Image (cartoon, grey):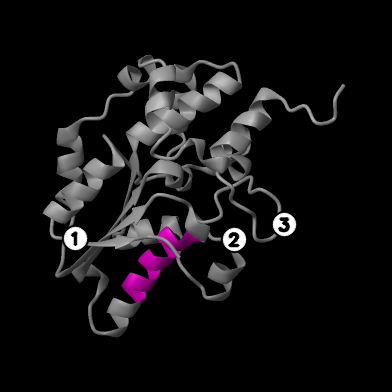
Amino acid sequence: MNSNSKNPRRKFLEKLAAGAGTTLAIPALLASITTEASAEVKVSANEGDDWFKRVKGKHRIVYDATEPHNGFPVIWSWVFYKSNNETGSPDSDLTAVVVLRHHGICLAMEDRIWEKYKFGEMFKVTDGETNAPALKNPYNVPTDPRMVAAKMDGIKNLTTRGVMFCVCDMALTVMSGAAAKTMNMSPVEVKKDWVSGLLPGMQLVPSGVWAIGRAQENKCAYCYAGG
């Protein structure tokens, strides 16, 4: 056997890492994935609009999280609350909305999904403790050494403080469908599994760009959640 040969799963992971999930590739991926996965888990715009009614307070921001970005979509949310608290604004007067879209969707899911589908490899997220591809979500209950040292809140605690996290259904459909193809699984079943593995409080929205627009309509200032 040729040592340079790669199995389909490995090729898929490397293709994603090289940018197959970028904006230019999304139409091709959508065309190759059955629409059954979209039809099976329906996302209501009305439900999303009702969710956005929870935006409150004088100080409002939306973080556009297109990539895991070493946890910055979570870190900047914590910084927003901490710095506003320190300048006299309580949590009750704050709302941060975090829109997880494109490759950022991995942050929306529980450890079970990370381990089963090898998200650390798929989305290029390294476990800060082992320096290996992460097998669990390092930003829900933080294991990232930077966050632990600074006593930063992760997604779980930030959600209880009022940070609103949502995830793009379009990206979730594309990525779960592509993963299903390479693993010889049903796109419908894989998407169902990913949706069932969303973290508590995580809102599924029609698309990330839809959510960015809705957040700004609800008077959230825009911030790109990169480094």
The residue carrying mark 1 is 220
What x and y, as percent, mark residue 108? 43, 45
Residue that lies at the very extreme toward the front in this rendered image? 24
Is 75 on the left or on the right of 211, as rendered?
Answer: right
Q: Amino acid at mark 2?
A: Thr
Q: Nearer the viewer, mark 2 or mark 1?
A: 1
Distance, label 2 to label 1, CA atoms, is 29 Å
What residue span does the magenta drawing correspond to? 71-82
Q: Name the quadrant of the C terminus.
A: bottom left
Q: Nearer the viewer, mark 2 or mark 3?
A: 3
In primary-sequence order, the first of circles 2 and 3 is: 3
Give the structural element (helix, strand or loop) at label 3: loop
Asked if the residues shown at circle 2 and circle 3 are in contact, with their CB atoms under 8 angstroms apart, the answer is no
Is 92 on the left or on the right of 137, as rendered?
Answer: left
Q: Main secondary structure of the magenta part?
A: helix
Choose between 215 and 156: the one closer to the eye.
215
Asked if the residues shown at circle 1 and circle 3 are in contact, with their CB atoms under 8 angstroms apart, the answer is no
Choose between 40 and 1: the one closer to the eye.
1
Examine the structure image and report whether residue 7 is included in the region drawn in magenta. Answer: no
Q: Amino acid at mark 3?
A: Thr
The residue carrying mark 3 is 130
Check the image and report above or below for 97 versus 195.
below
Examine the structure image and report whether residue 75 is included in the region drawn in magenta. Answer: yes
The crowd level at tag 1 (other Cα within 10 Å; few <14, some 14-19, many 20+) is many
Label for residue 143? 2
Asked whether the viewer can see residue 117, the reply is no
The crowd level at tag 3 (other Cα within 10 Å; few <14, some 14-19, many 20+) is few
Residue that lies at the very extreme toward the right in this rendered image? 1
